[in-house]
Amino acid sequence: MTISETARWLMERNNFLVLTHKRPDGDTLGSAAGLVRGLNRAGKTAYILFNPEATARYTTYVEKHWAPDGFVPSCIVAVDTASKELFPATGTDYHNRVDLCIDHHPSNTNYAGLTCLDTGKSSCGEIIYALLLALNGGLDAEAATSLYVAVSTDTGCFAFANTTADTLRTAAALVDAGAPIGELNRELFRKKAKSRVLLEAMITASMEFYFDGAVAIAVITRGMLDKTGAGENELDDVASIPGAIEEVVAGITIRELAGGEVKVSVRTTPLVNANDLCARFGGGGHAMAAGFSLYAPVDEVKKRLLDALSGIFPLSAAQ
Amino acid sequence: MTISETARWLMERNNFLVLTHKRPDGDTLGSAAGLVRGLNRAGKTAYILFNPEATARYTTYVEKHWAPDGFVPSCIVAVDTASKELFPATGTDYHNRVDLCIDHHPSNTNYAGLTCLDTGKSSCGEIIYALLLALNGGLDAEAATSLYVAVSTDTGCFAFANTTADTLRTAAALVDAGAPIGELNRELFRKKAKSRVLLEAMITASMEFYFDGAVAIAVITRGMLDKTGAGENELDDVASIPGAIEEVVAGITIRELAGGEVKVSVRTTPLVNANDLCARFGGGGHAMAAGFSLYAPVDEVKKRLLDALSGIFPLSAAQ
């Protein structure tokens, strides 16, 4: 559906419950908060389904919109969520009854009744911004702030490859509408907790290089989190650490989760398709940023990744 | 002078020599290259005065515009340079004959014949962008690229407090005009040499915290440089590493030089005067960034620094 079709669909309905994805980032939470605020201003009742994994970094922007106990929604809307497997535990009941999905991931599985997908947008927040302009309520400072969180975090403060001229124009419009850019940038990008700085150093020190340095793999163990005192809040964007090295064309982080699960994040240059690589492991995402989860020991995951990568780097042997 | 007055002044003249400041950053060099390209497109002869301190990071954008031997300028224009003391060694001859200064620093000393100053702009590049629109030649991809370098580096990729909605709109317009944002952001902000990344991790891991975490001291040994392969190029701004931690009010690096000399760099918040601290060791600098050198073992230097700091932090004991 186009933006205007989606806006019309929303305006014809009421009592919305907005779903975010598990391990929620700034884009899914900021998009949800912006959409709910926009719907409220258009005279609608709308809430965000409580996401138990929302971190302190983002709860400020969303907690006032958590759905109250007993709220019975008429419409279920998912934001920034490419497949129904990505809903948090609280979203299980809604797996097969998502009415509308608003997303920017090329890997979107088309699981919802209706889908408003624009893979050319940096972030779901950029789509919600366009949508709010098409709703009757317009954009106030609160919605602009939530959407600035969404757009700025998903683009690494406009430094990632997904940033376009439109992204910058959207951000400018959000600032004009009242998003306090100085405060938000300090909070989201310039301030670093000691535990985060120490964790980054450990992640960097753990890196192993393969294929003549073209692939860097870092492991984030539970021990590292214990030792540095880093919590979920300090894990934001750690996946970008190995890929920041100039020679690296595929930067991979393997993170130990609870219960034997590992989360793999892949960041690439245009030379390697991250989505294709992760699809082999049942995951997905974007061409230059994708991921997957597995229940397997770290060493086995590493071996399987290197096997898959050896098809992409056939000319060099793994070191 | 306003933008349109400045544009008119430039259009009425020819044979421009553009001066940049010493220890040149992306803003002064990008602004100079953008201005020269804009003047060229408006049919003017214009060059940049060679700046011997320009680093590899920026020479790509400026070197083609260095003034050839024997060029005799009719007009001297300085960009992003607040006072004539800030010109590089090559600019000595021009100290008292700058016809026009284009700048955004509130500290501008009004040393030029005419001044186009806008302290509300994030960067000098943002002013040059407006100026180029007012010149006859308009903006092409080359000028847009140079100005994107200027604006993005002076705002830390739009994360610093000087970033405004206008800054973001200017950046969007530069991207529309052909600045290759993905490539430039990777080059300027996302790419780090492997040796630098490994060195940063080692420096961070070496940090010791004192006075309830308010002071962080990192040691950069010659062994770390040998082990990571980091050279002078990779030591840029390493002094800022300990001070980036949010709780730290004095971040100190002690670097081993050849022959038993150590170089100490101090970065502080406004709570501690770095210049006063370094003056006790025969050094100096600015209130929030200063340094000194000594011939002494690292441990002795650390002890003497902690003694000096205990006068500033009298309420906590060194840990």
Image (tube, coloured by chain):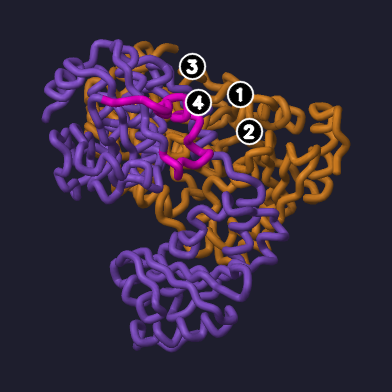
Chain colours: A orange, B purple
Q: Residues within 10 Å of mark 3 (few under 14, many from 20)?
A: some
The chain letter for the residue carrying disc 4 is A
Q: Please report whichever mark, 2 or 4, sits nearer to the chain's N-terminal start.
A: 4
Q: Return the x and y of residue B141 as percentages of the image width and height.
A: 42, 17
The reply to whether dot 2 and dot 4 touch (C-beta < 8 Å) is no
Res A16 → quadrant: top left
Label drawn at residue A107: 1
Identify the residue position indicated by label 3 in the image.
Answer: A114
Tag 4 secondary structure: loop
Q: Residue at x 68, y 38 (%)?
A: A248
Q: Nearer the viewer, residue A210 or A60?
A: A210
Q: Label 3 vs label 1: CA separation?
A: 16 Å
Q: Please report whichever mark, 4 or 1, sits nearer to the chain's N-terminal start.
A: 4
A190 over B102 or under it: above or below: below
For the N terminus of chain A, the quadrant is top left
Q: Return the x and y of residue A44 as percentages of the image width and height.
A: 27, 28
Q: Please report whichever mark, 3 or 2, sits nearer to the chain's N-terminal start.
A: 3
Tag 3 secondary structure: strand
